[in-house]
Image (cartoon, rainbow, N blue to C red):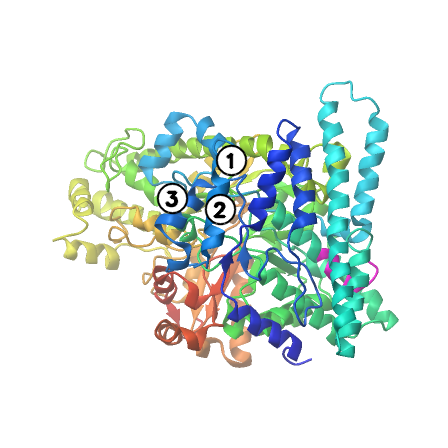
Amino acid sequence: MNGITERVHRLREKYLATPPSLDAERAVIITRSYQETEGEPMIMRRAKAMKKLLNEMTIWIADDELIVGNQAKVARAAPVFPEFSYDWIIEEMDNEPFEERTVDRFLIDEETKKTLRGLYEYWKGKKVNDLVLNMLPEESKKAIVTSGVFTFGFPEVAIAGVGHYIPNYKTILEKGFSGVKKDALKQLEQLGIPRDGRDIEKYHFWNAIIMVCDAVADFAKRYANLARELADKETNKTRKIELLQIASNCDWVPENPARTFWEACQSFWFLQLVLQLESSGHSISPGRFDQYMYPYYQKDIAAGNITKDGAQELIECLWIKLAEINKIRPIGITKTGAGYPMFQNVCVGGQTRDGRDATNELSYMCLDATMNVKLHQPSISVRIWNGTPDELWYKAIQVKKQGLGMPAFFNDEVIIPALLNRGRELEDARDYAIVGCVEPACQGNEYGWTGGTGDAPFFSLPACLELAINDGVNMLTGAKAGPATGDLASFSSFDEVKEAYVKQVQYFVDHFAVITNVVDLAHMQLVPLPVLSCAMEPCVEKGVDVSAGGAKYNSTGTAGVGVSNVADALSAIKKFVFDEKKYSGAELLSALRSNWEGQEALRNEIITSAPSYGNNDAYVDDLARWAAGVYCKLTEECSGPRGPYSPGLYPVSAHVPMGYWRAASLDGRRAGEPLADGISPVHGKDKNGPTAVLNSAAALDHLICSNGTLLNLKFHPTAVEGDSGTRNLISAIKTFFDNKGLHLQFNVVSSKTLRDAQKNPDKYRGLVVRVAGYSALFVGLDPAIQEDIIERTEYTELV
């Protein structure tokens, strides 16, 4: 099949023509349920809330749909999750209207506003956000407010639900929710009278599992009944047959094991959908779709029950359903990840659990679906190892050249050892997939949500360096934020600069751990997740909710931002103050405090003469490795309520707003300008071409970054055109991965095209670009993020 079918084309056009909006229905139903269950065990309250929601929410089946199930009353509408946070909804609805935003705009009518205001009083003091704010030590609150090290602020701590995981789709596909229910019933029977220790908690947990298993099955049957009603009225014979088959599918799955590829797609979707409805977390990633779905495809193809083209159309219908999932965030958080991202990451290729090549026909079909549908969701990633077939390489590059910024490439030869270093078993490590942006995780049995809040885990390394050379004082605000470590004017050696940096990073890593651990504890107490626990091993067997540590592997992921800013600043300090003694520390500090005003010559000398990361220069690359290593090693020493911390180096798009809050820096940045993107060089300072950038990035120690690293590049289409361009790209990626790089992604789009899209957004409404660890529709991005993408170095040749 070449290109999309007429059906998929119509669904895609309808998607693009549907503006995102805000839907109050979930908030209303959940509030009523909470009012009805006051005083009951929280796990049962959560189960009853899900049962009520799935029984009462509006459902619909759109024309042309083959996979059914909706998150809200209208496609692309975002539900509201008042049990997590709510104050910001009311405040922004009145003061920064969602429908007037310049980025990630949501339509909202007056009736919805009235409804949401009416629910507000009930939730005062009852939300996860409230508990977090009450639990936080005062010093940690101060660290948030004064330092600018973290992206979270008040009231934005813990505004989100739980995300950043890959559920065990295989469990639901093979056992159905009825099989999970049987497991829970068996455990209850064996438990008997819950007289010992914490058995009463297990008793309520298993009863909650039974309740949500029934609720999800009943939810699917509502769609079966609706499909039959529509079929009765349908005059088109082909569509009538489709609707009757949809009814049959929904009668059977996800309650029972899937028997066909179509049923497997529908069962997958119901699990994905219900998990999105249970929690407002994002990065609920499909993982290795080509692995757990392949047996159903293979069986149907062999039996003649489906054609390859028919299966391709089902996958593409599913891709559009994944794109419909939406979420609203506070405007401050929105700017750290603009473009309506949900970070649902599909991962193909790589190795099997026993170490053989995992590539199969579905691997290629998933890539084709992304190329055909051309939407920003789902994200798609390719796992690479030394056994990756040439055909998969060429297909991945073919898709990449479409200008979608997808797929991203991940290196098994680094990630599997990194996971083994974190205590994962070999088979599970080989079975990893990518969560959200770039975070590797063992699918189905690892609960490693990122940063506690699900929305704001980012940690500014440049902020720590600024505080290190300014005696712990925020240079922009004058607030005392970190420990007193002296200033650049008083340091007598470069080692003293490094020591001050280590002390600041240590201080703020410690507070970051306090903050995220408090968030974790609040979620344990107030929002257990019985549906997710059905699909995360071995929660049901253990009788422990996933939020309380029921998964096989538990961790908290973090993300450091601005590695190259720190490296370049340290390079300038080392060269000009201590090696050449051309300028004093006091002179450099003065230039920063004045935001380079009257110091343009000095600024230009720093930009042009100090060694800069991204040019394959060990002088600065070694500093980048050291500065990133300090953060990673201190982070991995931390422990959360469920398990250890896992460090990463990536920004989503938080590097742009994080730059707003920073004074000028010694990489030549002016106050308020964006930080560098991921482990990419500072814009415009990579002068020696993409090969040099890859060599600099490979100089970092990716093995200790088990929560992922992110490297962005941008190529003009002419730089990679034709077979020679494909071969050159493959060669460059292979070399980078041979040198122990973890991840690589790039845009293939010209700055000229992006400028035209800014001027003529209607002409480019379907233009998808790579922002950071995710892709987004370019015309919907915040102008500052658009500029950041345009200003990335554009390579016109691959050398």
Residue 783 as seen in the image, left or right of residue 729: left
Q: Quadrant of residue 785?
A: bottom left
**Does the rendering let one see residue 5?**
no
Q: What amino acid is labelled 1 in the image? A: Tyr
> Which image quadrant is residue 343 in?
bottom right
| Disc 2: which residue | 116
Residue 509: image x %, image y %? 43, 34
Q: Provide residue 382's location: percent of width, then percent of height.
A: 61, 62
User: Could you tell me how far apart the alpha carbons at marks 1 and 3 are, in whole angstroms?
Assistant: 37 Å
Asked which secondary structure carries label 3, the reply is: strand
Q: Is residue 265 magenta?
A: yes
Q: Which mark is residue 460?
A: 3
Earlier in the chain: of badge 1 and badge 3, it is 1
In the image, residue 107 sits, relative to residue 487, either above or below, namely: below
Residue 406, compared with residue 213, is above or below; it is below
Residue range of the region highlighted in magenta in the rendering: 258-268
Of tags 2 and 3, the one toward the viewer is 2
* 329 relative to 312 in the view: left or right: left
**Quadrant housing the C terminus:** bottom left
- 635, 153: nearer the viewer: 153
Question: Furthest-left residue in view?
Answer: 598
Q: Secondary structure at mark 2?
A: helix
Q: How many marks?
A: 3
Q: Pointer 1: what residue?
A: 122
**Of marks 1 and 2, which one's residue comes earlier in the chain?**
2
